[in-house]
Amino acid sequence: MTDQGRRAELAAALREVNTRIERACAAAGRAASEVTLVAVTKTYPASDVVLLTGLGVTEVGENRDQEAAPKAEAVRAAGASPRWHFIGQLQRNKARSVARYAGVVESVDSVRLAQALSRAAAERSEPLDVLVQVSIDGDTARGGAAGDDVWRVSDSVAAEDTLRLGGVMAVAPIDWEPDRAFAVLRGISERLVKAHPYATTISAGMSGDLEAAVRHGATHVRIGTSLLGMRNLLR
Ligand SMILES: *Cc1c(COP(=O)(O)O)cnc(C)c1O
């Protein structure tokens, strides 16, 4: 496909996603400006990120450092400067790499990872924003902190000068109603904000469940498929 063709395709998808966000906000009695779109560009090329930034997207999400690091470099070389959200499970030995290009790491779920990121972020000119990933159903196999670990991780992030605690992130468990999952997440966010009043971010909602997430207070929705198309599953 030509660059122009892809640009038109992305522009149409972006209009549709923005309309969904606006409608969901209106239905929830919220202002559309309260919800930020994070375009999840994993498996898609740097050229798509550049096109999306040209269409007004300012936040992009990636879940693997080995893919994101060269993509961020290519996007920068092309003259675009979106804010990169790291949203995948992160090994501590990748913390230094991620801290070089990410503006936000949304998937911090252990004290040890927070400490590794804190050391890595010392080389930055500004603190690294961090969200604590919460496992809503308590099954931590796919990432996320559960139970009191949520507070342990949050407090450890808040204690680091090189990190800035922004709030919480979660993926709704596959076998839960999204409304139930995001209601639980909202309760966790409310408790977090009592201890850390500025940590108001709730990153929740993907292509299939953004409306439910907006109903339950999401401030950021992470949208891949609805914007860029179906990903190849054999990756
Ligand atoms: C891939 C991914 C998304 C986007 O999912 P879609 O269903 O394609 O919108 C959101 N959040 C995380 C953590 C992801 O890994």
Image (cartoon, helix red, strand yellow):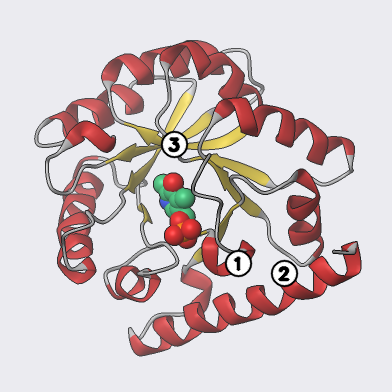
Q: Can residue 61 be seen in this snapshot?
A: yes
Mark number displayed over residue 104: none
Crowd class of label 3 (few under 14; some 14 to 19; many from 20; radius 10 Å): some
Q: Which residue is mark 3?
A: 88
Specify few, some or many for label 1: CA neighbours under 10 Å numbering under 14, 14-19, or 20 or more.
many
Kind of residue sitting beneath label 1 = Leu
**Is the residue marked by circle 2 packed among few (<14), some (14-19), or many (20+) residues within 10 Å?**
many
Label 2 with label 3: CB-CB less than 8 Å:
no
Image check: 14 left or right of 195?
A: right
Which residue in the protein does label 1 denote?
227
User: What's the residue type where badge 3 is placed?
Assistant: Gly
In the picture provided, is 157 more to the left or to the right than 56?
Answer: left
Q: Position of residue 185 (x, y in %)?
A: 21, 55
The Cα atoms of the two marked residues, 3 and 1, are separated by 19 Å
Q: Is mark 3 within 8 Å of ligand 1?
A: yes
From the top left corner, tell me how far across and down residue 143 is, in percent: 28, 34
Q: Are marks 1 and 2 in contact (CB under 8 Å)?
A: yes
State the residue position of label 2.
10
